[in-house]
Every structure is written in C-alpha cells, then in structure tokens.
Amino acid sequence: MKEIVSNHLKEVRRRMRAACDRAGREIPEITLIAVSKTKPLEALQAAYACDVRDFGENKVQEILQKAPRMPKDARFHMIGHLQRNKVRQVLPYVTMIHSVDSLRLAETIEQEACRLDKIVDILLEVNVAGEESKFGFAPDEVLKAVQQIGCFSHVHICGLMTIAPFVENSEQNRPVFQKLFQLSVDIKGKNIDNVNMSVLSMGMTGDYEVAIEEGATMIRVGTGIFGAR
Ligand SMILES: *Cc1c(COP(=O)(O)O)cnc(C)c1O
C-alpha cells in the first residue's frame, strides 16, 4: 500500500509541476486534495507519510470514522452532496465544504456554525455543464446565491467548485473549467462583502492537468493516488 501510494503521488506531483510550467503558474498555488472515499485508514496514513495533508470525502459517516484517527494536522474536505440533517455531526471535522448546492443547505450550515461559534469555509458547487444527474447551482443562479449567502455571518464563501462531466478526452472539459474560472472572475469583480473568490476546486484524476492550466487552485484526485475504487 505504502509504496503504491508513494509512487502514484510522485507521478501526480510530476504532472502537476508540468501543468504549472505550461501555464506559467507556481506549484504552491495549487492544493492537492487526496480523495480517500471508500479507502481504509491505512491508505490515508500512507498518503500522510508522503506529506499529503488534505483529504476529500463524500460521506459524513466516513469522515466521522477517519478524521478522529488521523494526526491533528490532517484536513478533511467535504466534497459530496451533504444532507442538511448531517451538517451538525460533520462540522467539527471539516476544514471546508466544497459541495454547497442550495440556499437551504447554506442556511443550515449558518445555524450550526453559529451554535459552535465558528466560521465555516465553503465553496458553491456549480453544475457548469447542466447535467441532469448532478447537484449544484446553474451558472446563472450563482451570483444571486453568493449575494444571499454573503450576508451570513458564520459562513465564508471562499470560491467555487465543479464536477466536470465524465469524458474520454480531458480536453473536452477545458470549456467547463474556463467557464467556472470566468464566473469566479465576474463575481470577484462585484466586490461583495464577506465573499472571497480565491478558490477554484476543479479537476479530478482524468482532467486535473487541464484544470490547472485553466486556473484550478484545488484539485481532487482519488483514483490517481489510491487506485481504482
Ligand atoms: C470521487 C470524487 C473525486 C475523485 O475522483 P477520481 O476520478 O477518482 O480522481 C473528485 N471529486 C468528487 C466530488 C468526487 O466525488
């Protein structure tokens, strides 16, 4: 396990550097999130030993199981659809929620964060390609959502997230990433109080290099690090 994860990480980091070079970007601009959903604790520990500190999970139950068993400086990112009745349980363990896909969910996070007296970093999930099967705001709904959620005092919008379609050739997703980038630039230009647009969470195993070329600041890589699920 250790050696496989270590070798995979070397390859991912090499490709990240190459994509940065092509785009004239610097490697510290990009956070690699190791998507450890369905994987055992030993897999996360192997990645941690290779200096990974950011882990992505899509189920509350898995975060509750894994987070308390990892070193204190490991960070957990909620990247899957979050049910409102699970917000209270998961909040103490997550560093950022990438998958805020409705105003009602943001309201629940606001209430629960207020109870805990903390400010929760979130991203708004955007369904850029308009896929029926996917969660997220439609691109033309995002600005309004940002304005509404920006008024909440215990939620901090840090940027946008998208899950691009499954494609054969990663180039097909370039326009999706370009659109999310442009959306974040447009919103940034409105200078809305309490709203930051510094994070763009986009790119998975099949397309993270293209995402980096198009401005991703967080990439979410599962299979490319831990192998097939
Ligand atoms: C599973 C998952 C990933 C990682 O997918 P891979 O193709 O295995 O890299 C990234 N983002 C989200 C939201 C996921 O659910």
Image (cartoon, grey):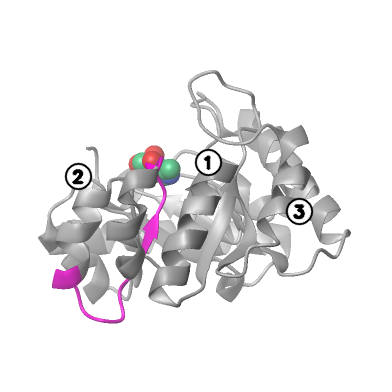
**Dot 3 or dot 1, earlier in sequence:** 3
Quadrant assignment, res 5: bottom left
> Vertical placement of 160 versus 42: above or below?
above
> Label 1 CB, ligand 1: below 8 Å?
no
Q: Residue at x 12, y 54 (%)?
A: 40
> Could you say which is closer to the camera, residue 219 or residue 197?
197
Q: Which mark is residue 207?
A: 1
Q: Position of residue 90 (x, y in %)?
A: 31, 59
Q: Which residue is mark 2?
A: 38
Quadrant assignment, res 191: bottom right
Distance between the alpha carbons at the discs numbered 2 and 3? 35 Å
Q: Residue at x 57, y 36 (%)?
A: 136
Amino acid type of the residue tagged 2 in the rendering: Thr
Amino acid type of the residue tagged 3 in the rendering: Gln
From which residue to which does the magenta span run?
A: 68-83
Q: Which quarter is ligand 1 in?
A: top left
Left or right of 227? Residue 184 is: right
Q: Residue at x 78, y 69 (%)?
A: 193
Quadrant assignment, res 33: bottom left
Q: Position of residue 7 (x, y in %)?
A: 27, 60
Distance between the alpha carbons at the discs numbered 1 and 2? 21 Å
